[in-house]
């Protein structure tokens, strides 16, 4: 029987011990004496969040197909266990073998959002690995990062040995083979990092040096090691059908956020919304073949026993075989008591029809993400959604029996005026009016229009990467203005308004477009006790502000400054295919309120064509 | 068509709570392809009911759940298929058809449960037992000879004084621990740790510093052929299997 890393007394004292015992269905056990490489895969948040992440399940499966590799999982210990581990000096361990992470060859960390940065330090620290990559020795695991935040890895540069930029399915084999080779030849840690630096898509931050101008912006960013590349090329799987996909994902004992089979139907998005980082990073859009997906659905449901299946993509309505796939899922699985959960689809006759089949209309709500209230603002962000489409969709849904609508908007977008903000409550009110146009005897009581706003954060590799942000007081004032306008609406009793906290927005903004000098802020915040910052109950803005003060780093430099066209950004050494010129052209078009058509309507020449994949080539086949 | 499944819960699975074990079995039914029946309605769910929740940390050789079948399945085949999709720490030991008759089915028939309470060297491990102190031995009879054993029963909402003596059907020292046969079910229910705590307090020990591991041996129904208050019970899988 497996021996657990935590004793019974601890396990019976902490919340949800199932987070730490492993043993789940489809978790992979191997004989470690027959393994060359031990890889600990980490999502730096609590188990229930980490286990819901598709990317890790894909890589876990991919690594474990190799006989010479054993990939295990590790998540952030929750605050209760965190404290006990520090007090009793228990090293962080992997779920499968329960062995200390310290003994592994690799610690891989997926970096999905900025507010997990202190949790990354927690994981490295509790593992007993030096926080600074330069202080690590030959016996320490190689700490490698991946995921969306690595498209600007600079704030984390100090803490990682390697960053893997792009789809994980492409060069991991090379990276692992090089490791084995180096180990066999008795090579040092540095030897390996140099070899890794030679592999496409791999960034070794300690092999580069940044110089700054007097105004604080970057003067130069140069390799200091002959093996380091000048630019790092994003990795991309061109054929999504012919690649890895986990047929038997791990099934957690406790209820996790994503407690279902997930079918990734496509990667990338054709839309080109100017605020959206994923829409640029994952270009070009690549579809998975529908027949393959049908097979996956069968096998994965059978292997997991899950009672729900869901589709995953950035914009499912753009998947060309959506109708075929959804019809199939309903026909095959509905009678087996399998729930079919559809991601937010564009509201039209088809989506209303299928939603009516798979969910209880009285309980479910419709979701629209207009992102901006006025047409002018929607043109600025290139969101191809008009008021007419929204009111039409809502009207059809109301006629079909729905009476709950959720609306998502952003505040603080570039060029936003008072009128743009006031348009948000007005649009919500128009939707309510549309509802009350239906004769009373055919209505289902009152309607409920729930509006949420978040604050816009400019992200690297988007046309808005040049945009300035605001300070906390301004964000709060904008939300207050919207709230006030809601109270002026005719149907205010049917309208609800929520807005996000402004504190976190400011920090996310700093780290999204930050540089290497932020490593010390993160380290200081962690030292001051910041952890689980994406959890409202744990977030402590005051501590973060102290961390900035203590390190002398100015938030305004990152958030409130206007960036010029020729400024060198910390992430400019990464090539995602989409060119900086294209992004700037889109920025200028945004300021003029000009829309750009989507990839299927017309190619805009963003530059990603050089990958020769997905939507860029589909019309030419 | 109804079936009763008996399973063991041991090892690391003792840290998985009752609700999660239910979820685990729902998913296991699908993986094993057991032809379980669903309720009707908009969101159908499996017709499945568990006998007696088991606390986190407690192991068991006698856990039960009843399911409704939509078609026949050969019991040995069902046991084999289920065990193929289990994890270490859960083992299906019996699968038997039960009559559809209400008086056999439904978990309302649960009336008693037997346990072993094992004294431990340390709360850190349930695997290292400690010999039962000689000086405590004689106290056990003394404890049971009391006219009443009043304890504070805590629920989520309130604390009440209760005399647990009538719910202790049997309590005796055996080689590997204290054997307990206690009332269980929806009418009256007594958890083994409550009895042990009362005993420890009785002999002047601090219950919080004397670690025990609890193991459930089996769950019982009242034997219908005996008079109501006779305290004659039979294991759930003997009721009609």
Image (tube, coloured by chain):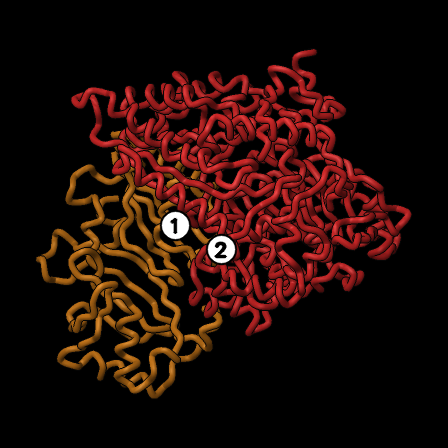
In this rendering, would A88 be left or right of A495?
right
Chain letter matching colour orange = B
User: Looking at the image, which is closer to me, A359 or A609?
Assistant: A609
Of residues A340 and B132, the one drawn nearer to the viewer in this rendering: A340
As drawn, is A132 to the left or to the right of A360? right
The residue at the point 18 percent across, 77 percent down is: B149
Quadrant location of the C terminus of chain A in the rendered image: top right
Which percent across, then down, holds residue A151?
68, 42
Q: According to the colouring, which chain is red?
A: A
Query: Which one is closest to the eye, mark 2 or mark 1?
Result: 2
Is residue A407 positioned above or below A72 on the image?
above
Occupied quadrant, residue B170: bottom left
Q: Is residue A545 left or right of residue B200?
A: right
The N terminus of chain A, quarter of image:
bottom right
Give left or right: position of A174 versus A302. right
- Is residue A41 visible in this depiction of the protein? no
Q: Secondary structure at mark 1?
A: helix
The residue lying at 60 percent from left, 27 percent from top is A592
Could you say which is closer to the camera, residue B37 or residue A269?
A269
The chain letter for the residue carrying disc 2 is A
User: Mark 2 and mark 1: span between their CA atoms?
Assistant: 12 Å
Q: Residues within 10 Å of mark 2 (few under 14, many from 20)?
A: many
Residue at horizontal 43 percent and vertical 65 percent from the top: A12
Q: Position of residue A202 (x, y in %)?
A: 77, 43
Eyeballing the image, is A613 above or below A489?
above
Residue B237 visible in the current orientation: yes
In the image shown, does A481 or B142 lie closer to the viewer? A481
Q: Which residue is mark 2?
A: A19
Residue tagged by mark 1? B20
Q: Quadrant of residue B10?
A: bottom left
């Amino acid at each position: 029987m497996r021996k657990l890393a935590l004793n019974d007394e601890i396990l019976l004292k902490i919340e949800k011990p199932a987070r730490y015992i492993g043993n789940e269905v489809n978790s992979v056990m191997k004989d470690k004496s027959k393994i060359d490489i031990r890889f600990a895969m980490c999502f730096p948040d609590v188990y229930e969040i980490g286990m819901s992440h598709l990317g890790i399940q894909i890589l876990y499966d991919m690594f474990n197909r190799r006989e010479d590799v054993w990939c295990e999982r590790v998540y952030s210990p929750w605050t209760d266990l965190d404290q006990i581990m520090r007090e009793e000096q228990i090293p962080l361990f992997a779920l499968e073998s329960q062995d200390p992470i310290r003994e592994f060859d690799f610690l891989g960390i997926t970096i999905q959002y900025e507010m997990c940065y202190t949790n990354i330090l927690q994981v490295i620290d509790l593992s007993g690995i030096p926080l600074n990559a330069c202080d690590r020795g030959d016996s320490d695991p190689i700490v490698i990062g991946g995921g969306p935040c690595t498209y600007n890895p600079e704030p984390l540069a100090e803490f990682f040995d390697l960053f893997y930029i792009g789809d994980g399915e492409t060069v991991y084999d090379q990276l692992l083979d090089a490791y084995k080779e180096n180990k066999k030849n008795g090579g040092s840690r540095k030897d390996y990092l140099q070899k890794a630096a030679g592999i496409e898509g791999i960034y070794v931050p300690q092999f580069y040096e940044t110089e700054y101008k007097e105004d604080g912006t970057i003067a130069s960013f140069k390799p200091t090691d002959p093996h380091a590349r000048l630019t790092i090329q994003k990795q991309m799987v061109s054929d999504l059908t012919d690649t890895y996909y986990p047929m038997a994902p791990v099934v957690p004992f406790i209820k996790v956020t994503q407690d279902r089979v997930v079918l990734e139907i496509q990667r990338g998005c054709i839309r080109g919304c100017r605020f959206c980082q994923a829409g640029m990073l994952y270009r070009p859009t690549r579809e998975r073949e529908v027949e393959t997906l049908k097979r996956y659905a069968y096998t994965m449901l059978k292997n997991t026993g899950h009672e729900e299946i869901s589709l995953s993509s950035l914009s499912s309505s753009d998947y060309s075989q959506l109708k075929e796939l959804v019809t199939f899922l309903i026909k095959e699985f509905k009678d087996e008591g399998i729930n079919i959960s559809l991601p937010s689809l564009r509201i039209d006759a088809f989506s209303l029809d299928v939603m009516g089949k798979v969910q209880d209309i009285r309980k479910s709500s419709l979701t629209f993400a207009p992102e901006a209230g006025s047409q002018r603002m929607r043109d600025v962000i290139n969101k191809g959604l008009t008021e007419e489409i929204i009111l039409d969709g809502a009207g059809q849904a109301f006629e079909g029996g729905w009476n709950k609508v959720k609306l998502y908007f952003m505040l603080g977008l570039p060029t936003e005026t008072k009128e743009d903000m006031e348009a948000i409550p007005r649009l919500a009110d128009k939707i309510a009016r549309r509802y009350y146009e239906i004769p009373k005897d055919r209505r289902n009581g009152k309607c409920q229009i729930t509006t949420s706003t978040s604050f816009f954060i400019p992200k690297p590799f988007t046309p808005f990467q040049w945009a300035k942000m605001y300070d906390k007081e301004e964000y709060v004032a904008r939300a207050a203005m919207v709230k006030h306008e809601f109270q002026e609406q005719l149907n205010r009793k049917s309208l609800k308004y929520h807005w996000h906290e402004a504190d976190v927005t400011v920090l996310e903004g700093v780290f999204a477009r930050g540089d290497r000098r932020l490593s010390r802020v993160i380290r200081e915040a962690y030292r001051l006790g910041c952890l689980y910052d994406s959890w409202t109950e744990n977030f402590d803005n005051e501590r973060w502000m102290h961390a900035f003060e203590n390190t002398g780093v100015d938030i305004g430099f990152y958030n409130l400054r206007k960036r010029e066209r020729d400024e060198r950004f910390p992430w400019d050494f990464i090539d995602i295919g989409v060119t900086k010129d294209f992004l700037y052209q889109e920025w200028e078009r945004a300021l003029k309120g000009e829309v750009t058509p989507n990839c299927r309507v017309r190619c805009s020449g963003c530059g990603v064509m050089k990958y020769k994949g997905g939507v860029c080539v589909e019309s030419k086949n | 068509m109804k079936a009763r499944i008996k399973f063991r819960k041991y090892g690391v699975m003792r840290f998985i709570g009752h609700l999660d074990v239910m979820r685990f079995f729902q998913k296991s039914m699908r993986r094993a392809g057991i032809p379980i029946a669903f309720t009707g309605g908009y969101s159908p769910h499996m017709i499945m009911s568990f006998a007696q929740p088991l606390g986190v940390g407690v192991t068991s050789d006698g856990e039960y759940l009843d399911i409704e079948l939509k078609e026949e399945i050969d019991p040995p085949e069902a046991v084999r298929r289920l065990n193929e999709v289990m994890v270490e720490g859960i083992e299906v030991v019996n699968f038997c058809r039960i009559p559809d008759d209400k008086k056999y089915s439904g978990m309302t028939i649960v009336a008693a449960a037997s346990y072993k309470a094992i004294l431990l060297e340390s709360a850190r491990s349930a695997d290292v037992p400690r010999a039962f102190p000689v000086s405590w031995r004689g106290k056990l009879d003394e404890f049971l000879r009391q006219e009443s054993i009043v304890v504070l029963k805590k629920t989520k909402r309130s604390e009440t004084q209760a005399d647990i003596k009538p719910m202790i059907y049997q309590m005796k020292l055996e080689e590997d621990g204290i054997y307990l046969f206690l009332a269980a079910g929806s009418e009256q229910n007594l958890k083994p740790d409550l009895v042990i705590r009362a005993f420890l307090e009785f002999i002047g020990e601090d219950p919080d510093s004397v670690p025990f591991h609890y193991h459930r041996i089996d769950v019982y129904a009242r034997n219908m052929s005996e008079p109501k208050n006779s305290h004659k019970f039979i294991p759930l899988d003997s009721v009609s299997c």
